Amino acid sequence: MQRFGRKRDVESLAEIVPLSLFAFDCLHADGEDLIDAPTEARVERLHALAPADAIVPRVVTASAEAGRRFSPRRSTRGTRA
């Protein structure tokens, strides 16, 4: 039986099970609950804390055309060749 919290060789496991971080919101940071904060404030906090390449791109617009132009970019994010 294995113990919970057992130390693991992260580098070896990363080769076997590669993972990628995709951050899209920040609901809690540095002891502060942000769940009721405005979206803009949470996104700003996310950008202050997470690496830029880990943040899921987003667009805020009232334009359907701008949404359509943005949509193809989303579908290619996170895929492997």
Image (cartoon, rainbow, N blue to C red):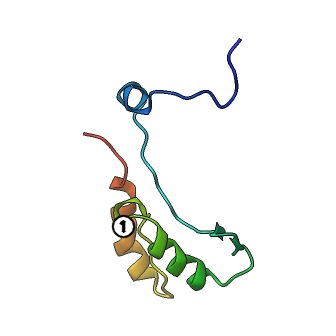
The quadrant holding residue 25 is bottom right
Measured as percent of width and height from the top left, residue 2 is found at 68, 16
Q: Nearer the viewer, residue 23 or 70?
A: 23
Q: Nearer the viewer, residue 67 or 77?
A: 77
> Is 44 situated above or below 31?
below
* Residue 9 appears left or right of 72: right
Residue type, numbered disc 1: Ala
- Residue 28 spot, x, y in % from top left: 66, 68
Q: Residues within 10 Å of mark 1 (few under 14, many from 20)?
A: few
Q: Residue at x 47, y 55 (%)?
A: 22
Q: Which residue lies most toward the top here?
A: 1
Q: Residue at x 59, y 84 (%)?
A: 41
Quadrant of image for the C terminus: top left
- Horizontally, is 65 left or right of 5 in the view? left
At x 48%, y 85%, the residue is 61
63 to 5, vertically: above or below: below
Image quarter of the N terminus: top right
The x, y position of residue 23, in whole percent, is: 50, 60
Residue that extends furthest to the bottom in the rendered view of this protein = 62
Disc 1 designates what residue? 52
